[in-house]
Image: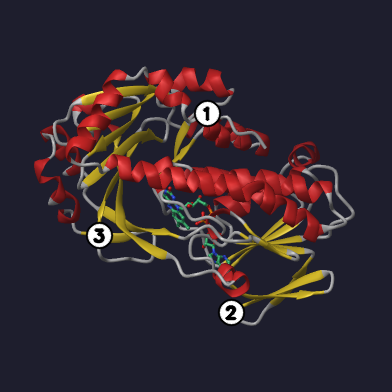
Amino acid sequence: MSMTNATQKALDGEPTRDVGSILIAGAGIGGLATALALAKRGIASTVLERRSAFEPEGAGIQIGPNGTRILAELGVADELEPLAGKPDAVHARNALSGASLARLPLGKWIEARHRAPYWVLHRQDLHAALLKSARESRIISIMTGFDVASAAMERDRVSIQDKGGRRLDGDALIAADGLRSHLRGELFDAPPLRFAGRSAARAVIPFEAMPEPLRENATTLWMSPRAHVVHYPVRGAREVAVIFVRKDTIASDDWSTAIPNAWVTDIAEGFAPILRELLETPPQWKKWALYELPPLPFWNLDRVALLGDAAHPTLPFMAQGAVLALEDAAVLARAVAERPADLPRALALYASARRHRASRVVAAAKSNGRIYHLDGMAAHARDATLRMAPPTMLMSRYDWIYGWRP
Ligand SMILES: Cc1cc2nc3c(=O)[nH]c(=O)nc-3n(C[C@H](O)[C@H](O)[C@H](O)COP(=O)(O)OP(=O)(O)OC[C@H]3O[C@@H](n4cnc5c(N)ncnc54)[C@H](O)[C@@H]3O)c2cc1C
């Protein structure tokens, strides 16, 4: 699509002469957001993506106010708004009895509290909006089919090579190459990912396919010792993303391993009938194994820095994986813009501003996972707390997450 000069100007900031071009490995959520955040400050970048094309993959992704605020700053919120689900509440339920335990407020309450909305999106829609905006920028180049295999520091440059031996130079390299980051292992001597012993099955179904009593505008969370289930409306409430998390022994290594429905329904034997009905609805579930990595001691090395899942893989139980990548992008762009003549220092400041927060969110996600799968008396105590505590008080405990600002 051709654009007027005025539109292009609105996308990109004034050019910054001190920085030539930043290389970004990975055109996922974090890599594209970083390119856009840099472009807003007039800094050019080249985004290298291993895939030769962007396939329609993924399912639901939740974006709290700390993330939607950044999407607005990047200029993609207007495009996403009609596609976003805007749940009124987190509806906590017991998966075995079906009992409704609490409705923690989202919707208008959280938007007023943090001055930004809580959205639930299809990952494809989020990725497509970031990609479209990046393609429209005059100072962002995107190369697909470029699988970054190595990087070398050369005085005041970074040189990277892809698997086919193609070479590119830049002023700095941001490794946003995701959960299985190759650069994290190669340059940061990081330990291997550890399979968390759990996998998530995901499906997206039409809203009308939902059992009638479950058709509500909420992020619904069903908890049980064996598994937990989350579902929420996406694509402007035309579809519903359903996620089922259980113990597993087989660590698949992509986002979309097709699995037999029995992988879900066998575990759901003792669940409330209405929940079982929902879990029997999707024609096909896709599995995604969950991984952990202890906090890394450092994320930056001279002119290279890790970002997003490459820096801090997280379990999805706080729904903050994509949002942390957006936060990283905002902080990194500011640090580079403030110190364009000293990029190693800029990357060091970015890493020190982010490491503690990312570790804290990752720990909170892990702790949520334990709470969702409590058993016996501990599960009774959890359910009683949810029933009795004021919902706004329960939600306010997450102010430190949703109230974050770059
Ligand atoms: C196909 C796909 C589907 C996903 N679906 C979901 C979902 O449904 N729900 C959810 O919560 N999360 C999903 N995620 C993960 C989610 O996007 C991330 O956890 C989060 O957004 C953090 O973003 P990120 O940029 O760090 O990583 P990602 O968004 O995973 O992006 C990493 C990118 O780097 C590319 N890459 C990897 N290695 C190299 C290399 N050597 N050279 C160049 N490029 C490389 C990858 O192809 C990918 O495009 C998905 C990720 C992918 C890649």
Q: Position of residue 271 (x, y in %)?
A: 13, 39
Q: Secondary structure at mark 3?
A: loop
The residue sitting at 86% across, 50% down in the picture is 16
Q: Nearer the viewer, mark 1 or mark 3?
A: 1
Q: Which mark is residue 163?
A: 2
Q: Residues within 10 Å of mark 1 (few under 14, many from 20)?
A: few
What whole-number distance in Å separates the C-alpha atoms at marks 2 and 3? 33 Å
In the picture shown, does residue 225 fall above or below 297? above
* Circle nearer the N terminus (1, 3): 3
Q: Secondary structure at mark 2?
A: loop
Q: How many marks?
A: 3
Q: Is residue 303 left or right of residue 317?
A: right
In the picture shown, does residue 195 fall above or below 228? below
Which kind of residue does numbered mark 2 sit on?
A: Lys
Q: Which mark is residue 399?
A: 1
Q: How is the image coloured?
A: secondary structure
**Residue identified by numbered label 3:** 248
Q: Which mark is residue 291?
A: none
Residue 79 in view in this figure? no
